[in-house]
Image (cartoon, rainbow, N blue to C red):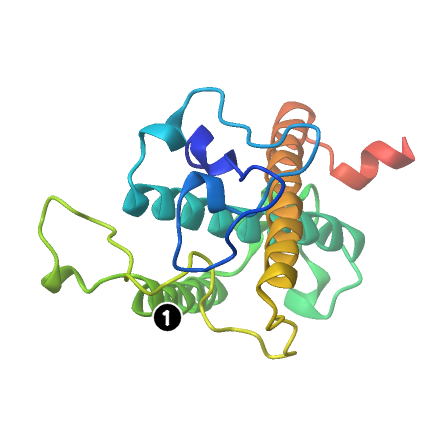
Amino acid sequence: AGSAAAFAPAQTGARSTSLNAFTAADLPGALAPMGFFDPLGFAEKADEATLKRYREAEVTHGRVSMLAVIGFLVGEKVEGSSFLFDASISGPAISHPGQVPAGYSAIIIAAIGFAELQRAKTGFVDPSETSFDNPGELNADYYPGDIGFDPLGLKPDDAEELDIMITKELQNGRLAMLAAAGFLAQEAVDGKGILEHFSS
């Protein structure tokens, strides 16, 4: 899920909350007692563009992991009772993707591709407009993770409240990355679903 710098949140305390000031000292995401956690020093060696890419990777992996954790739990809970695919998908969630009929897999892949294309258009410089040695360059005015998707209008206008919300999302994403990795490992080791472990 990226490098250790993806887990390098900002120092707590008074700091700038400007979305365009992107330095290690200005990153939201730090909580006591750890504060700014970057034991390998990735953030201090990174320039602004690299730091933004680290944060983009962390936010994206966190969001995917949060969805994965929900998918594991819900997929196993509704096993055999879902209207999808004639309720034929069963077993641990790690085996579910292989049981989805081929036509539906193509739809899922297309939907993921569409979402990624929209994210790329929002956040990344067009590859034809950047040098070959600078892949994955983010737009100068793009804040990592802010793809403009807020259908419920939850994004606060106040910069300090926004930092708090970003910190909450980062912390939940970090926990979900660990949980998803644990779920995958546990199911791969013993072939039992996560929910089965609670009932046995």
Q: Quadrant of residue 141?
A: bottom left
Quarter occupied by the C terminus: top right
- Number of numbered discs overlaid on the protein picture: 1
**Is 129 situated above or below 188?**
below
- Tell me if mark 1 has few (under 14), some (14-19) or many (20+) residues whose alpha carbon lies within 10 angstroms of its own: few
Q: Secondary structure at mark 1?
A: helix
Question: Residue at position x 62%, y 34% from top?
Answer: 178
Task: Identify which amino acid the numbered label 1 is placed on.
Answer: Gln
**Is 101 situated above or below 65?**
below
Question: Residue at position x 59%, y 73% from top?
Answer: 157
Q: Position of residue 164 (x, y in %)?
A: 65, 55
Q: Position of residue 31 (x, y in %)?
A: 67, 38
**Viewer-nearest residue: 129 or 75:** 129
Of all residues, the one furthest to the front in this rendering is: 14
Of all residues, the one furthest to the right in this rendering is: 199
Q: Position of residue 43 (x, y in %)?
A: 39, 32
Question: Residue at position x 46%, y 37% from top?
Answer: 6
**Is 173 situated above or below 7?**
below
**Viewer-nearest residue: 101 or 20:** 20
Q: Quadrant of residue 46?
A: top left
Q: Position of residue 194 (x, y in %)?
A: 75, 38
**Viewer-nearest residue: 60 or 195:** 60
Q: Quadrant of residue 12?
A: top right
**Is 134 situated above or below 141?**
above
Label 1 belongs to which residue? Answer: 118
